[in-house]
Amino acid sequence: MTTDVLRVRGLVVHYHTALGAVKAADNVSFTLKAEERLGLVGESGSGKSTMALAILRMIKPPGRIEAGEVWLEGINVMTLPEEEMRQVRLARIAMIPQGSMNSLNPVMRIKAQIVDALTDHGVQLSARQAEERVRDLLQSVGLKPQVAGMYPHELSGGMKQRACIAIAISLRPKVIIADEPTSALDVVVQKQVMETLARVQKELEASVLLVGHDMGLVAQFVDRLGVMYAGKLVEVSPVRDIFTKPLHPYTQMLIASLPSLEHKGTFRGIPGLAPLLRDLPPGCAFHPRCPQALDRCRTEAPQFKEARPDSWAACHLL
Ligand code: SF4
């Protein structure tokens, strides 16, 4: 039987601005199974990065988690005191951030940054043990031992991102959240970083939540794909199904807009713009752009429900 490692239930995150509350995540629920890779995709501003931060309780003011539960291996981390949560981060659930440039300390050598993360979580190491641990971690992400003595500015973009992966896996977490881990890298390096992530995930028997805006890229890596629109999860389906029989009209249009060899030279975008999160349309937030909208879509928000085995979606057509 497959066990759930992470269960997110009814997560609501608002950013409080002078112009009103920005509803960045609105009643989002999903499950991550043991050793599963789940992708979370959507346009920028759809709430996917907010979700990643909220799961780790790293939302900063003016943002606030308004409601919801995040069950990590049977513990609702939303109820933990901050000090305990700090220990859970990295040790049980770790984040590979969007910009490695901003997350690595520019004035510390890589070795010191890895050792810092370990000692901060109570790992006591002799100088020799630290040396060995750093070398092993670097090796597991495909970096040479010499990288330990380097500063971030001496590394290429791909090497920096691998160094971030090394820090993220230093305490062998069971869940890894990767937020656009390859966004600033060229395609060849992107592939290498994703392969590194896949390798360490297997080795740790961890689950991965991969957040990204490039549906084609994310889909190559994951088992199931979640699609976010205007702060809501609108569909979660296995990858093998989502491309052949997408349930939600937004997913269908996202897939139709992906470049393909058959439709070389033609680009089918999605008409209209994503709505402002502080001024969402009533009913289904996708209705102004949806070619299949019904009358009730303008007033009644659809429920997120299981529409076929293992596939969930929020649409009145289902
Ligand atoms: Fe389109 Fe209505 Fe479904 Fe929303 S609920 S996606 S507007 S059909």
Image: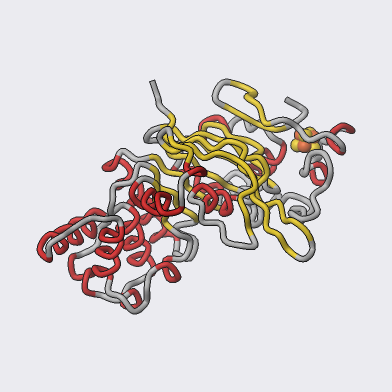
Task: Identify the colour scheme used.
Answer: secondary structure
Q: Quadrant of residue 189?
A: bottom left
Number of marks in picture: 0
At horizontal 46% and vertical 45% (from top left) the residue drawn is 80
Q: Residue 118 location, x and y as percent?
A: 27, 58
Left or right of 115, for residue 5? right
Q: Residue 98 location, x and y as percent?
A: 48, 61
At horizontal 42% and vertical 43% (from top left) the residue drawn is 208
At horizontal 46% and vertical 53% (from top left) the residue drawn is 82
Q: Nearer the viewer, residue 211 or 189?
A: 211
- Residue placed farthest to the right in the image? 295
Q: Quadrant of residue 1?
A: top left
Q: Nearer the viewer, residue 122 or 46?
A: 122
- Residue placed farthest to the left in the image? 128
At horizontal 51% and vertical 44% (from top left) the residue drawn is 78
Q: Which quarter of the rendered picture does the C terminus lie within?
A: top right
Q: Residue 295 location, x and y as percent?
A: 89, 33
As drawn, 38 above or below 267: above
